[in-house]
Image (cartoon, rainbow, N blue to C red):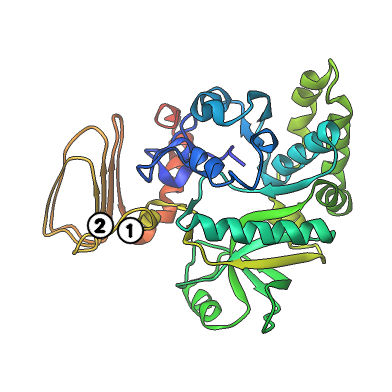
């Protein structure tokens, strides 16, 4: 899934250059790192990307020969993750037959690739053997308030667990309780299931979305495929896979992973990619930093100089500067909303 805007990484992330097309780690574009860690599990000809029309051309150029260009599926309009997954499932069913789908966000960081591949293979085995919706949960290491949680049936000696419920992003006290209690995992947003199984779930829980997907599917492979997609896709309900299916289904299993995962969802998560200095800072680009503690300073074009700064995020690009308290990093998306309200979309493009 590669259609998001990465608004919490503004001003570095923009509509035509979102987080998945950034080289945040210094090792490569996030989308390419996602593709590369699938090698050995999924053949190149079986990898698909779903992105949106504003990012499609840059996406094709960015992934290069890693992907078959015809497997970069373009949404005419962003309609959230249920539509994105349904579109890919219908494409696979109609053109390739039923198969196991591994649904992966394109902009996550994973440190231990070998362990990630082990967990993914376990999830594939469960999905092959049973008509279940399998999700990968992450063993929580701190009381994160920026992640959703999965409450599961914790049984000793098991590696696959029944899911009780999905819990939305909690406050700090609730998150602390989850970390201290057995049976809670971070919701990674990674899923494994048969294409046919998820389409059956759409038919059951999201019938309007399913009926439109059927019409799109009937046109696939015909001369009317493009025009049908353009006409009908915008009518798909905009709902997440979590709200639309996972929170309502009774056939959900979770497999726990511990492979150095982070969704790198906002600037304060950059510590997953970089070592902190002795004062707890991350500095990128030209810097002069005096008496600066627990801060993130990211310079693209100009020098950043700080004196006596603590727990701050400072990001400089060619046309914008962000200054934000570190504990308010989740609210950077509010800046994006405000720019839209004020007609300043030029700073979002």
SS under mark 1? helix
SS under mark 2? loop
| Quadrant of the rendered image containing residue 131 | bottom right
* Frontmost residue, 157 versus 283: 157
| Location of the N terminus (image quadrant) | top right
**x%, y% of residue 23?**
39, 39
Circle on res. 33: none
Circle on res. 295: 2
309 over 57 or under it: above or below: below
- Furthest toward the front, the residue is 40
**x%, y% of residue 188?**
58, 59
* Residue 34 appearing in the image: yes
**Residue 113 vs residue 43: left or right?**
left
* Frontmost residue, 120 versus 292: 120
285 over 319 or under it: above or below: below
Separation of marks 2 and 1 at Cα, in angstroms: 7 Å
* Frontmost residue, 82 versus 218: 218
Mark 1 nearby-residue class (10 Å; few <14, some 14–19, many ≥20): some
Residue appearing at x 35%, y 42% in the figure: 26
| Location of the C terminus (image quadrant) | top left
Asked if marks 2 and 1 touch (Cβ < 8 Å), the reply is yes
Residue designated by label 1: 326
Mark 2 nearby-residue class (10 Å; few <14, some 14–19, many ≥20): many
| Quadrant of the rendered image containing residue 66 | top right
| Quadrant of the rendered image containing residue 4 | top right
Q: Earlier in the sequence, mark 2 or mark 1?
A: 2
């Amino acid at each position: 899934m590669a259609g998001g805007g990465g608004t919490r990484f503004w001003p570095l992330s923009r509509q035509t250059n979102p987080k998945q097309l950034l080289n945040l780690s210094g090792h490569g574009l996030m989308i390419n790192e996602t593709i590369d860690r699938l090698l050995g599990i999924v053949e190149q000809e079986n990898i698909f990307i779903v992105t949106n029309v504003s990012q499609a051309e840059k996406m094709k150029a960015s992934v290069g020969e890693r992907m078959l260009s015809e497997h970069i599926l373009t949404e005419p309009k962003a309609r959230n993750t249920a539509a994105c997954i349904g579109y890919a499932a219908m494409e696979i069913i109609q053109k390739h037959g039923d198969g196991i789908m591994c649904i992966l966000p394109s902009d996550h960081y994973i440190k231990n690739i070998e362990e990630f591949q082990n967990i993914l293979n376990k999830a594939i085995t469960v999905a092959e053997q049973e008509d279940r919706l399998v999700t990968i949960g992450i063993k929580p290491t701190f009381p994160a308030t920026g992640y959703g949680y999965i409450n599961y049936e914790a049984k000793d000696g098991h590696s696959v667990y029944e899911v009780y419920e999905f819990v939305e992003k909690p406050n700090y006290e609730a998150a602390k309780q989850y970390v201290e209690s057995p049976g809670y995992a971070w919701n990674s947003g990674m899923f494994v299931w048969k294409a046919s199984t998820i389409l059956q779930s759409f038919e059951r829980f999201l019938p309007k979305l399913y009926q439109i997907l059927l019409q799109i599917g009937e046109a696939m492979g015909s001369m009317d495929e493009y025009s049908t997609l353009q006409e009908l896709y915008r009518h798909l309900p905009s709902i997440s896979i979590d709200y639309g299916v996972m929170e309502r289904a009774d056939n959900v299993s979770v497999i726990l992973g511990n492979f150095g995962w982070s969704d790198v969802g906002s600037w304060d998560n950059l510590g997953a990619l970089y070592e902190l200095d002795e004062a707890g800072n991350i500095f990128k680009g030209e810097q002069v930093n005096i008496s600066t503690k627990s801060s993130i300073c990211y310079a693209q074009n100009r020098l950043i100089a700080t004196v006596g700064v603590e727990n701050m995020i400072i990001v400089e690009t060619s046309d914008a500067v962000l200054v934000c308290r570190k504990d308010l990093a989740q609210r950077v998306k509010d800046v994006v909303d405000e720019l839209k309200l004020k007609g300043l979309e030029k700073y979002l493009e």
